Image (cartoon, helix red, strand yellow):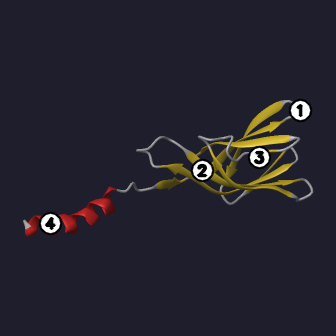
Amino acid sequence: MNIIKTLCLFLTPLFLLFDSPAFAYIEKDTAIVRVMNKAAGKTQIVPVKVGQTVQYDGLTIKAQNCKQSDPFDAENFFAFIEIYTKSDIRIFSGWMNHNEPGQNPLQNDTYDVWLEKCE
């Protein structure tokens, strides 16, 4: 009986250690964002390569990172985005999440910007 108790005490931490989910992400090269100009009433898909900036309709958009969730989980995308106005005022800096676009998009008087996907 002592052998069973000893085995249980030894193996239980191992099961707990290896049973936890692994959070694997696939690094992607391009963040695909959707920009809505509220004043003009138009939306546009804008690809932004990681590490580069794109000028679009009075905004400067920079993608610092773009990741896809583990392909064995529900598909999701995450991107760290910085957005500046024409006058170099930062109006957004943070992570955007594709599956929860309302959680952390850019929303201001003129523009809405949210993440569509990473490629």
Residue 99 is situated, as x and y percent measured from the top left of the image, at: 59, 40
In the image: residue 40, left or right of residue 76: right
Note whether 26 is above or below 34 in the view shown. Answer: below
The amino acid marked with disc number 1 is Ala
- Cα separation, mark 1 vs mark 3, equals 17 Å
Q: Nearer the viewer, residue 91 or 28?
A: 91
Pick whichever of labels 4 and 3 is earlier in the sequence: 4
Q: Could you tell me how far apart the alpha carbons at marks 2 and 3 are, in whole angstroms?
A: 14 Å
User: Which residue corresponds to mark 1?
Assistant: 40
* Mark earlier in primary sequence (4, 2): 4
Q: CA distance from mark 4 to mark 2?
A: 45 Å
N-terminal-most mark, 2 or 3: 2
In the picture of the structure, the residue carrying the numbered disc 2 is 78
The numbered mark, 1 or 3, whose residue comes first in the sequence reads 1
Say which label, 2 or 1, has the lower sequence index: 1
Q: Amino acid at mark 4?
A: Lys
Query: Which residue shows up at 75% across the image and 43% down it?
Result: 113
Crowding at mark 2 (Cα within 10 Å: few <14, some 14-19, many 20+): many
Is mark 1 in CB contact (under 8 Å) with mark 3? no
- Quickly name the residue at label 4: 5
Q: Amino acid at mark 3?
A: Leu
Could you tell me if the residues under marks 4 and 3 are in contact, i.e. CB atoms within 8 Å? no
Disc nearest the viewer among 4 and 3:
4
Residue tagged 3 = 106
Q: Seen from this angle, which residue lies furthest right?
A: 87
Measured as percent of width and height from the top left, residue 38 is found at: 86, 34
Is disc 2 in contact with disc 1, using a CB cutoff of under 8 Å?
no
